[in-house]
Amino acid sequence: MNPAALVDYVRETYGVSPEHLWADYPEAFVFRHRSNRKWFGVVLETDRKSLGLPEAGRTFLLDVKTGPILGGSYLGQPGIVRAWHMNKTHWLGVLLDGTAPAQTVRELLDLSFSLTDG
């Protein structure tokens, strides 16, 4: 799944549009609940090496809240890394370069939405 497909999914599923909060980073955005304003997803562009990946270059990453136990069970799956910018115990990173299956991206985003809805 790429960032554009992710935005489409979030708009269709949750009725939420991305919010661009940082003028210096126009490619970065967050998804947040309308009711409580909590973030349930953060999309950032970062260097692959900073994520511990062997390939050079940049990639888009979705950070989602999972919790320590469930999050740990996803680590090691294709396209799943430790979160970037967020708490690494409670958040995971999902590569938006097609490495993580779209179903996994949707599952983790749905979980994050649920965990932050309150």
Image (cartoon, rainbow, N blue to C red):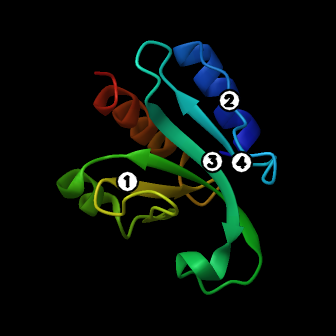
Mark 4 and mark 3 in contact (Cβ < 8 Å)? yes
**Mark 4: few/some/many CA within 10 Å (<14, 14-19, 20+):** many
Mark 2 and mark 3 in contact (Cβ < 8 Å)? yes
Residue 22 in view: yes
Measured Cα–Cα span from mark 4 to mark 1: 17 Å
Secondary structure, mark 3, is: strand
Identify the image quadrant of the N terminus: top right
**Mark 2: few/some/many CA within 10 Å (<14, 14-19, 20+):** some
Q: Earlier in the sequence, mark 2 or mark 4?
A: 2
**Mark 3: few/some/many CA within 10 Å (<14, 14-19, 20+):** many
Q: Amino acid at mark 3?
A: Val
Measured Cα–Cα span from mark 3 to mark 1: 13 Å
Secondary structure, mark 4, is: loop
Q: Which mark is residue 91?
A: 1
Left or right of 25, for residue 32: left
Q: Which residue is mark 3?
A: 43
Q: Earlier in the sequence, mark 3 or mark 2?
A: 2
Where is residue 95 drawn, in percent x and y?
59, 58
Q: Which residue is mark 2?
A: 18
Q: Which mark is residue 28?
A: 4
